[in-house]
Amino acid sequence: MSAQSSSIDLKKSLLDTLLAGLLALVIFGPIVGVVLDGYSFNFHADRVVWSVAVVMAGRFLVSAFLQTSHGKKFSSRFDLTGSGVTVLPPGYKSNMRWILLLVVLVAAVLPFVANKYILTVVILGLIYVLLGLGLNIVVGLAGLLDLGYVAFYAIGAYGLALGYEHLGLGFWSAIPLAALLAAFAGAILGFPVLRMHGDYLAIVTLGFGEIIRLVLNNWSSLTGGPNGMAVPSPTFLGLEFGRKAKDGGIPFHEFFGIAYNPNLKYIFIYTVLFIVVMTVLYLKHRLTRMPLGRAWEALREDEIACRAMGLNHVLVKLSAFMIGASTAGIAGVFFASYQGFVNPTSFTFFESALILAIVVLGGMGSTVGVVIAAFVLTVVPELLRNFADYRVLLFGVLMVVMMIWKPRGLIRINRIGIAVPEGVAK
Amino acid sequence: MKVPILELRNVDVFYGPIQALRDVSLEIHEGETVSLIGANGAGKSTLLMSIFGQPRAGGGEILYRGEDISKKSSHYIASNGIAQSPEGRRVFPDMTVEENLLMGTIPIGMTHAEEDLQRMFELFPRLKERRNQRAMTMSGGEQQMLAIARALMSRPKILLLDEPSLGLAPIVVKHIFQTLRELAKGGMTIFLVEQNANHALKLSDRAYVMVNGQIRMSGTGRELLEDPQVREAYLGGH
């Protein structure tokens, strides 16, 4: 049986090849074969033959490959049937830690080899990783569709800008404060929407996001309105990263006796951001294994069952909102310091949609998927600047393709099952 | 006289302007199996959910061991010994059987998880075979067993069951009622809401009949089973 299934069905492949050849003939015949020459047409049969031959050969190879055991494995990864979560045995050890080690190594080397441009692109990517991870808790794990997530991002960014202007806060003190502030805002949003689901929740959160943006835009006396606000450069133990310190302080490069490097500020932001992202990744990893993480997933799967079992859904929903929001608040602080300036145009609905796209494309609830999707959706448009105009089009096509081929996102969630205490009969 | 483990006194429940339950009074004593039968829309499930405060009783009292719980939060009620297997099973589709069962320990914590899991697997050997399977992929009967087992994981003093026979083949229903009988023999207090009057009345010590949000009749299971009115209305008249 196995020998038969592993051998290639030549007839089927030939049939596929013929069909593809016919299609190619129809398409390439008039387009490639008929060449306009002055006022007359010339028919180039050789070009058509070549095009069709290439297509047929390619189709034959693909067809043959898909019938080999490797090919079957490959196509089974696009299988639509087994949607949902794959549950791995409790003792499962993934090879993730080796990949993680590699990532950390690459990240450590990066500042020494990259120029300023690449650094800023990577910083942007990391900021979106942070945002994606935060929204992933709200949407991916707890199943609460939040379309106004960018509001918390704005609160973080403006928290630093306003805090600097009115209270003299710096980068470091702003990080925890922005997280708290955003979490508080998350609770304020969370309370009225406790009884809402799906579409209604989406509308309310959408409204919340717009309210925050409009307030920032119109409260000119406090926020500077559309003109935005200046944000201080970050400092390291009071050392500044400029060539000359502003208020009689010592610049970083003089203190350590190294040559001035204009990238220092970005290297610093990059380093801190990378550490923060790693910490958030770790915390999220732990959270999904804690009862709270389980409760989020249970809430996503069936709210009525949760209530019937006595899960405190107020606490569970609020905690998801607050933890998600505080992550965005931290991301906002980094974004503001990285830009050196904030204004409301950075916090439009498009940003919310982008972050949501990261979560959906990455795979709801999947951490690795979100990290990859965040980089793909932020770094690729940067690198392909020439195609920036087509970015939204690219999103659209990507979304449609993903929903057809991988409706559960790039990386399917692999959940390691709960380890049952020792002694239970196997 | 002993205080009933659960007692409803003149409970009214409203959905907006519509009154779903009217002056409902019933009591369940420790160790008893009591069932509530009635047609679709009679208010059976509403009554069960209102014990959990969803919806809240608009009037009257719900006493659990003498304490009024009609104003308490759902999770308070659940963590104090009342468990329910909700209508339509409502297992968590993407979690495995084991994880579903462990979700049931939320009200009391994981301290007894190990031995309770063992107990559930003895009660429902089928679940043991399927322990690492996702709940979504199981048959309706298996999901119902899982829902009951999940409710039992919180070590309840009283188990509320909402239509365990819903949408199941007669043979599976029989099997599930067999298990419930074993549970009752083991001392569990069971309050069963059912449309399948025949099975429910045979299992129960006492039963109530609900019509249009009111309790119409009550008596022992056998009495009601032989009552001509009940036979006419719920047992197809034969």
Image: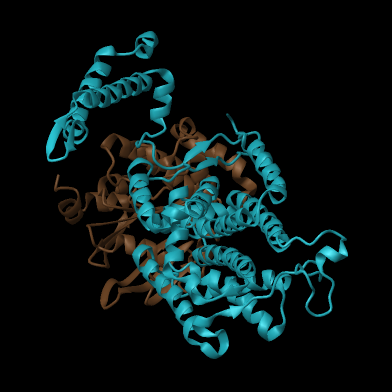
Residue B51 position (above or below residue B180) = below
Q: Residue at x 39, y 23 (%)?
A: A72
**x and y percentages locating residue A253 in the rendered image:** 82, 63
**Outermost residue, left direction?**
A40
Q: Residue at x 48, y 78 (%)?
A: A212
Q: Nearer the viewer, residue B32 or B58?
A: B58
Could one spot residue B108 in this view of the protein? Answer: no
Supply the letter of whichever chain is cyan.
A
Quarter occupied by residue A424 = top right
Q: Residue at x 61, y 39 (%)?
A: A419
**Outermost residue, front direction?**
A38
Q: Nearer the viewer, residue A313 or A361?
A: A361
Q: Nearer the viewer, residue A383 or B59?
A: A383
Supply the letter of whichever chain is brown.
B
**x and y percentages locating residue A18 in the rendered image:** 21, 21
**x and y percentages locating residue A219 in the rendered image:** 50, 87
Residue A21 position (above or below residue A202) = above
**Position of the N terminus of chain A by quadrant:** top left
